[in-house]
Image (cartoon, grey):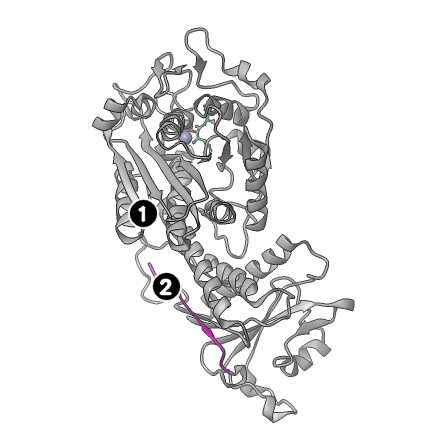
């Protein structure tokens, strides 16, 4: 898998030759195109004919050697340049301005794929009215996020060799190079973490098992300042993680509880992340319909998001203690599998009547939440899971659902999601819903019927968090085929990695 390198340059832009030199333009008052004086002379005819309006994601490619400019001293040496429009930005809210820049980044990576360009030079000036460092961050994030493809299992066509991606990005600035350098390094770490999450999700169920989750975490801990603990099946039995064991019962693949910890020297607060790592969800004995079942390899996207977030956190080094737990298993049927009617006793002694073995996510998360909170006593806990089909019915593929027991935590996550353009929509989690998961034989049952399916799933999880401030993200609709954007390809989006990283780094 290729990794993009970024450099920051203060070189005179007029003298840049190779690669693709990129300028940005916005729509100013009366729709006038506003952009750098350096490129304006090359846009003369285009602007006169209104062939370029600087609309969002509009782009033009120009060849300076073919255009005569009046002032020779101001000519550009670049072989090829591109001007990318950002649309009207003046009275937009901050997060929309950020999104315009990020989205221009995605447009650039798409253009690079078409043109087969591997070397891009981004001109970060004051056109957008953003600090150079901020503009560079969002741009580079968008470019790298958009520069993603997964071709591992495809034979290469000798006639059309696949484009391997952008190998080098140079951010060109006239000032503040030091600050810009730091901010683009962060952007690269975050975007590469998102790529990791997408890669895990793209792997089929037979190539991404609970053991693969464990191996990835162990390797991450070797490479970075993280500690890793793997709780395997015998240890789970000893500890009494009977929820995870119950879901795993029908499987030939052993379950793992993967734990990664980032402990900075100075720490202010601790945050625990818990991600559903269900590597394939057949539904178990309550089997899912055959049509579309192959998509259920994506049921590990919460675990992938949490693992990838730890990768970014290890690079960004915030003053926050972060503990990540990924309960990982598949959900299979068979003669030893969990059955409807079975009663299980969770780690925290809460008993649950299994009504539908396809509501398995809450079972493994319940154990992981209870165990993690007891063992690490975090200041707050956030779980991330492709938990319910109901959230897709309610919110489609544009918002993730968020529920929780703490307004401040939920609001903080909603803010972080907005900044990253990974919007969250809160659903109520009031007492009334608990009635739907009351059981005649156990403390609770694992489904609450069709009504408010996303909320009753969260109501189940609530039994495992006690008084700890807790938020639950249901990403079933956004982890795959999230609202298509220039920087989010079809398939796995890597959702929640950026939001969680932003949330933790703001703490
Ligand atoms: N993994 C699924 C939820 C899901 C559905 C994720 C579609 C991604 C796309 C989850 O384990 C599940 O099967 N939930 C059931 C719960 C029901 C049996 C109460 C559902 O939503 O149908
Ligand atoms: Mn299921
Ligand atoms: Zn599932």
What secondary structure is marked by label 2?
loop
| Quadrant of res 161 | bottom left
Rendered-image quadrant of the N terminus: bottom left
What secondary structure is marked by label 1?
loop
The answer to whether 208 is drawn above or below residue 9 in the figure is: above
Q: Nearer the viewer, residue 202 or 134?
A: 134
Q: Nearer the viewer, residue 344 or 325?
A: 325
| Quadrant of res 242 | top left
Residue 182 part of the magenta-drawn span: no
Q: Is mark 2 within 8 Å of ligand 1?
A: no
Q: Residue at x 56, y 64 (%)?
A: 135
Q: Residue at x 30, y 49 (%)?
A: 220
State the extent of the magenta-drawn residues as a range.
1-11
Residue 474 showing in the rendered view: yes
Q: Nearer the viewer, residue 239 or 489?
A: 239
Residue 7 part of the magenta-drawn span: yes
Q: What x and y, as percent, mark residue 186?
A: 45, 59
Q: Residue at x 47, y 43 (%)?
A: 480
Q: Residue at x 66, y 91 (%)?
A: 70
Q: What x and y, as percent, mark residue 494?
A: 45, 47
Q: What x and y, as percent, mark residue 281?
A: 37, 31
Q: Earlier in the sequence, mark 1 or mark 2?
A: 2
**Residue named by callout 2:** 162
Query: Could you classify mark 1 by the number of other residues whose Cα lies within 10 Å: few (under 14), some (14-19), or many (20 or more)?
Result: many
Residue farthest along the front direction in this orientation: 266
**Residue named by callout 1:** 226
């Amino acid at each position: 898998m290729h990794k993009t390198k970024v450099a920051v340059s203060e070189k005179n832009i007029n003298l840049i030759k190779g690669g693709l030199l990129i300028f940005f333009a916005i729509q100013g008052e009366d729709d006038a195109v506003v952009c750098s004086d350096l490129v304006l002379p090359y846009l003369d005819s285009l602007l006169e004919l209104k062939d370029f309006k600087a609309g969002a994601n509009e782009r033009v490619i120009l060849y300076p050697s073919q255009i005569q400019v009046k002032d020779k001293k101001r000519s550009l040496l670049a072989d090829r340049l591109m001007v990318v429009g950002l649309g009207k930005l003046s009275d937009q809210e901050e997060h929309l301005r950020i999104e315009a820049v990020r989205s221009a980044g995605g447009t650039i990576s798409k253009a690079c794929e078409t043109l087969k360009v591997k070397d891009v030079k981004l001109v970060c000036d004051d056109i957008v009215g953003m600090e150079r460092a901020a503009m560079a961050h969002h741009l580079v994030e968008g470019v790298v996020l958009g520069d993603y493809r997964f071709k591992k299992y495809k034979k290469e066509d000798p006639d059309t060799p696949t484009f391997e991606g952008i190998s080098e990005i140079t951010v060109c600035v006239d000032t503040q190079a030091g600050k810009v350098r730091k901010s683009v390094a962060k952007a690269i770490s975050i975007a590469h973490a998102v790529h990791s999450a997408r890669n895990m999700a793209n792997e089929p169920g037979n190539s991404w098992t609970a053991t693969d989750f464990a191996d990835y975490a162990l390797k991450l801990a070797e490479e970075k300042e993280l500690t890793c603990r793997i709780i395997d099946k015998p240890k789970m039995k000893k500890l009494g993680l009977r929820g995870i064991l119950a879901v795993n019962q029908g499987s030939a693949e052993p379950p793992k509880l993967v734990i990664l910890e980032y402990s900075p020297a100075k720490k202010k607060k601790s945050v625990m992340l818990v991600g559903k790592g269900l590597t394939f969800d057949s539904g178990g004995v309550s089997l899912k319909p055959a049509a579309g079942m192959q998509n259920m390899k994506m049921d590990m996207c919460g675990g992938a998001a949490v693992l990838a977030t730890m990768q970014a956190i290890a690079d960004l080094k915030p003053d926050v203690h972060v503990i990540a737990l990924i309960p990982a298993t598949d959900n299979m049927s068979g003669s030893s599998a969990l059955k409807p009617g079975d009663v299980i006793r969770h780690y925290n002694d809460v008993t649950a009547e299994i009504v539908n073995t396809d509501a398995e996510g809450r079972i493994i998360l319940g154990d992981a939440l209870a165990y993690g909170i007891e063992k690490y006593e975090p200041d707050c806990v956030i779980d991330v899971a492709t938990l319910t089909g109901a959230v897709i019915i309610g919110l489609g593929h544009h918002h993730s659902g968020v529920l929780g027991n703490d307004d401040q935590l939920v609001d903080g996550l909603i803010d972080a999601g907005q900044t990253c353009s990974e919007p969250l929509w809160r659903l109520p989690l009031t007492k009334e819903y608990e009635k739907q998961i009351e059981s005649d034989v156990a403390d609770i049952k694992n489904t609450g019927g069709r009504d408010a399916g996303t909320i009753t799933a969260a109501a189940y999880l609530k039994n495992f968090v006690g008084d700890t401030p807790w938020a639950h993200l249901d990403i079933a609709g956004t982890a795959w085929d999230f609202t298509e954007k220039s920087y989010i390809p079809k398939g796995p989006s890597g959702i929640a990695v950026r939001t969680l990283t932003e949330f933790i780094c703001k703490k």
